[in-house]
Amino acid sequence: MISREMVSVTEAYIDGMDAMMEYMIDQDQDAKTRVSEITWSQINNRYEVFWSRSPHNTMPRLTTAGLSAISDRLPIMADGDHVVPIEVEVNYEPSFNVGIGDQTIKQFIVTRPRFVPRICLTGVPCS
């Protein structure tokens, strides 16, 4: 969805992504979602965060300093390229005792904008 956007996304758009995830899972389980946009800076020799949002602040916003914790999961990028990592966590409690205990299921996906150089967030400078 987000990789095909050609206009700025809004906080409501990101909230809607989270609401869709909540709709698809059991009602007694909550999803935590974080959507960010990052770039590679050749001059600074590091990944940098342009923006990061988590509906209802269920996950902390990703910061440039915090990228070191996930840098091994980010792709090699050319200078100035942008990607959107989307992180989701769901605490899973099995309905029946089948030998699987409670656990947190985590999904980490990095997508690249398809039709524009970067995905902008309304209210955040996009230059």
Image (cartoon, rainbow, N blue to C red):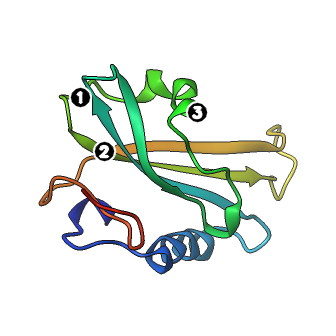
- Disc 1, SS: loop
Judge whether 117 appears above or below 63 on screen.
below
Judge whether 94 appears above or below 107 on screen.
below
Q: What number of labels is visible?
A: 3
Label pair 1/2, CB-CB below 8 angstroms: yes
Most extreme residue toward the left, as rendered? 115
Q: Distance between the residues labelled 1 and 2?
A: 9 Å
Q: In which quarter of the image is the N terminus?
A: bottom left
- Of circles 2 and 3, which is in front? 3
Q: Quadrant of the C terminus?
A: bottom left
Q: Which residue is drawn at 52% across and 29% down?
A: 70
Q: Residue at x 83, y 37 (%)?
A: 99
The label on residue 77 is 1
Mark 1 surroundings within 10 Å by alpha-carbon count, few (fewer than 14), some (14 through 19), many (20 or more): some
Mark 3 surroundings within 10 Å by alpha-carbon count, few (fewer than 14), some (14 through 19), many (20 or more): few
Label pair 2/3, CB-CB below 8 angstroms: no
